[in-house]
Amino acid sequence: MALIEAQNVGKIYHTGKVETQALREASFTINAGEFVSIMGPSGSGKSTLLHVLGFLDRNTEGMYRFDGKTIDDYSSNELARVRNKRMGFVFQSFNLLAKATVIENVKLPLLYSDVHEKLWDEMARHAVDSVGLSHRIGYHSSDLSGGEKQRVAIARALVNNPAVVFADEPTGNLDSKSGAQVMGIIENLHHQGKTIILITHETYTAEYAQRIITLADGRIENDRKVREDTKSINRHFVK
């Protein structure tokens, strides 16, 4: 069974009497362990699609299933649990608590989980170590570089060992070197078996994935596999 299944998914926003169709007839499946990029310019509908896929928003048309269930199959408490336990989120703006330390930020999802508190430190330290930031574990996030902040955000997304990681423009606020480091971590997570869904407007970032779904004006314009030789050429060009 596909982990993610979308059939003619659409999203309409209403502002007063104005109706905006942000997403139209999106159909695709993503299997467990895949690395898929969703690419498109600003306003193409990619962030709207991520919000639907991550149960952060509700589709208004079509059918979307995660792990075989639609959003209507869950109570509000069950939805919160799915987002906390089965999904990890990484955003362009990091969304860290500035006055909290690295380990405190990474532990945040555990506050809303059913994991016993005595395990929190161990789980958070493991997640921090996985992104190579053990030497910064006691630093406040306000004292970190942009690349380090994003690595903390990735560790936080991983702390509950989710089935899928959604990364929304994770390199958007980073220089090219830091961006490459972050993408290397994300790529390694995929090699470890994680399902990765990456939102980006950058071709060379998108091509870290196995497959690229391209959106334009709310519609899927293309869904293609990424050639390995293309990946290596583009990474050499970026460097």
Image: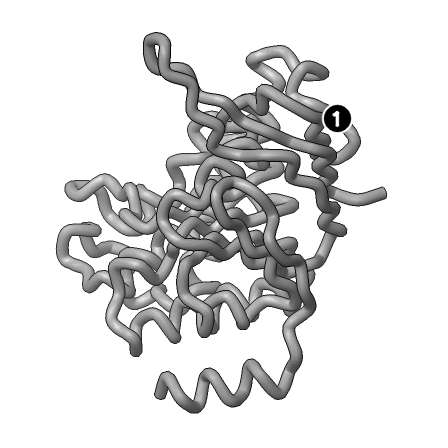
Task: Please state which amino acid type lies under the numbered disc 1.
Answer: Lys
- Residue 236 appears anywhere in the view: yes
- Crowding near the residue tagged with mark 1, few <14, some 14–19, many ≥20 C-alpha atoms within 10 Å: some
Visual colour scheme: one colour
Query: Residue at point 65% right, 31% down?
Result: 9
What quarter of the picture does the C terminus occupy? bottom left
Q: Residue at x 56, y 52 (%)?
A: 197
- Residue drawn at (74%, 43%) of the image: 3
Q: Residue furthest right?
A: 1
Exactly how many numbered labels are in the figure?
Answer: 1
Residue 158 seen in this snapshot: no
In front: 153, or 63? 63
Q: Which residue is mark 1?
A: 69
Q: Nearer the viewer, residue 134 or 219?
A: 219
The picture places residue 65, in percent across and down from the top left corner, at 72, 31
- For image coordinates 23% across by 61% down, the residue present is 146
Question: In the shown orientation, is residue 148 left or right of residue 64?
Answer: left
Q: Tell me the quarter of the picture where residue 223 sits.
A: bottom right
Q: Is residue 25 above or below residue 142?
A: above
Q: Nearer the viewer, residue 71 or 38?
A: 38
210 in relation to 29, above or below? below
66 left or right, relative to 202? right
Quarter of the image that includes the N terminus? top right
What kind of element bears circle 1?
Answer: loop
Q: Nearer the viewer, residue 154 or 99?
A: 154
Q: Is residue 188 above or below residue 120?
A: below
Residue 26 percent across, percent down from the top left: 65, 39
**Picture quadrant of residue 55:** top right
Write down the quadrant of residue 229 in the picture: bottom right
Instruction: Return the x and y of residue 127 as percentages of the image width and height.
Output: 47, 55
Q: Position of residue 154 (x, y in %)?
A: 42, 54
